[in-house]
């Protein structure tokens, strides 16, 4: 199992999973699932891959029948277990890939993202859930008393930086949704209330200051052919086929 090494301190996979079982961690999962429940029904295909630092299923709302949750540790219940930086799947195998906080806690986020891009089919989607540094949680993180503890040990990758990485991998951003605007305390009035996205994500306030973001990106490799106008006359004429004159046309040609 690859080591989980955040910015300056280290945290074990067990520590991360224990935090997601806490009251605050469960609330974060509920809010993130509320967003995924609105996004996933619009994504179709044959195969979906979930890669998450925790073991709860997050893709139940997907219409895709074949859902794979890959385990990251020897004791995981999933029938598939592997290295997130070397996925045991062929190229262009998955219609949808969900990366749930993997980029936050692993020490090789770009390698994981490249692997996710490799196994995603052309026009397939990658969904990335991560912690936002431009939030109350991000502001609390540098002064947190226990910096080595979860979730403060996470990478908190900037959405803009992540979008740059996706652009280099020939992905285009379809949507970015934010959630969890309260402070990171379970006694906050914001905690315990799951946002209502029943009328659609685009109709809700979506300020880029939420503690978590969900990025939906589409892979365009090998699917787009750029058509350029042929301004050169010689090139245009070069595409014409010369037909040999026959019959009356040939005789007239000889007399000429």
Image (cartoon, rainbow, N blue to C red):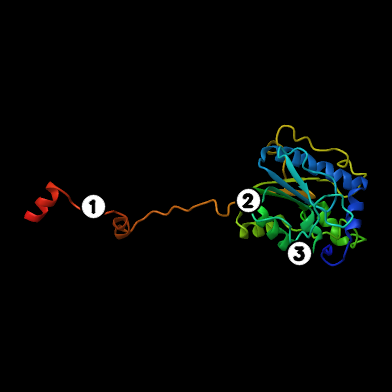
Q: Is residue 223 left or right of residue 236?
A: right
Between 38 and 131, the one lying in front of the other is: 38
Give the mark nearer the N terminus: 3 vs 2. 3
Residue 33 appears in which quarter of the rendering? top right
Residue 213 at what x, y percent from top left?
Answer: 75, 49
Residue 83 at what x, y percent from top left?
Answer: 78, 60
Q: Nearer the viewer, mark 3 or mark 1?
A: 1
Q: Do labels 3 and 1 touch, CB within 8 Å?
A: no
Farthest-out residue, bottom: 8
Residue 242 at what x, y percent from top left?
Answer: 25, 54
Crowdedness near tag 3: few (<14), some (14–19) or many (≥20) residues, C-alpha within 10 Å: some
Farthest-out residue, left: 255
Between 254 and 101, the one lying in front of the other is: 254
How many numbered dots are placed on residues in this image? 3
Q: Is residue 247 left or right of residue 56?
A: left
Q: Secondary structure at mark 3?
A: loop
Instruction: Tell me the number on the disc at residue 108.
Output: 3
Give the mark nearer the N terminus: 1 vs 2. 2
Structural distance between the alpha carbons of marks 1 and 2: 44 Å
Q: Is residue 141 left or right of residue 206?
A: right
- Tell me what residue is drawn at x 66 percent, y 42 percent: 45
Between 250 and 45, the one lying in front of the other is: 250
Residue 88 appears in which quarter of the rendering? bottom right
Structural distance between the alpha carbons of marks 3 and 2: 22 Å
Instruction: Tell me the number on the disc at residue 243.
Output: 1
- Tell me what residue is drawn at x 9 percent, y 55 percent: 254
């Amino acid at each position: 199992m690859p080591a989980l090494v955040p910015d300056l301190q280290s945290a074990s996979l067990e520590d991360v999973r224990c935090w997601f079982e806490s009251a605050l961690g469960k609330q974060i999962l509920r809010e993130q699932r509320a967003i995924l429940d609105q996004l996933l029904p619009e994504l179709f295909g044959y195969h979906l891959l979930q890669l998450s630092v925790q073991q709860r299923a997050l893709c139940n709302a997907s219409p895709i029948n074949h859902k794979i949750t890959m385990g990251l540790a020897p004791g995981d219940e999933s029938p598939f277990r592997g290295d997130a930086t070397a996925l045991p799947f062929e190229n262009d195998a998955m219609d949808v890939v969900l990366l749930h906080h993997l980029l936050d806690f692993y020490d090789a986020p770009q390698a994981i993202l490249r692997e996710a891009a490799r196994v995603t089919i052309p026009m397939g989607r990658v969904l990335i859930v991560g912690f936002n540094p431009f939030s109350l949680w991000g502001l609390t993180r540098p002064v947190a008393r226990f910096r080595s503890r979860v979730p403060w040990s996470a990478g908190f990758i900037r959405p803009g930086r992540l979008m740059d990485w996706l652009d280099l991998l020939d992905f285009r951003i379809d949507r970015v949704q934010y959630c969890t605007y309260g402070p990171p305390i379970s006694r906050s009035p914001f905690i315990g209330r799951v946002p209502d996205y029943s009328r659609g994500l685009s109709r809700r306030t979506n300020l880029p200051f939420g503690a978590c973001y969900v990025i939906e990106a589409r892979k365009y490799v090998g699917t787009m052919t750029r058509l350029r106008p042929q301004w050169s006359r010689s090139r245009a004429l070069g595409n014409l086929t010369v037909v040999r004159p026959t019959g009356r046309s040939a005789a007239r040609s000889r007399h000429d």
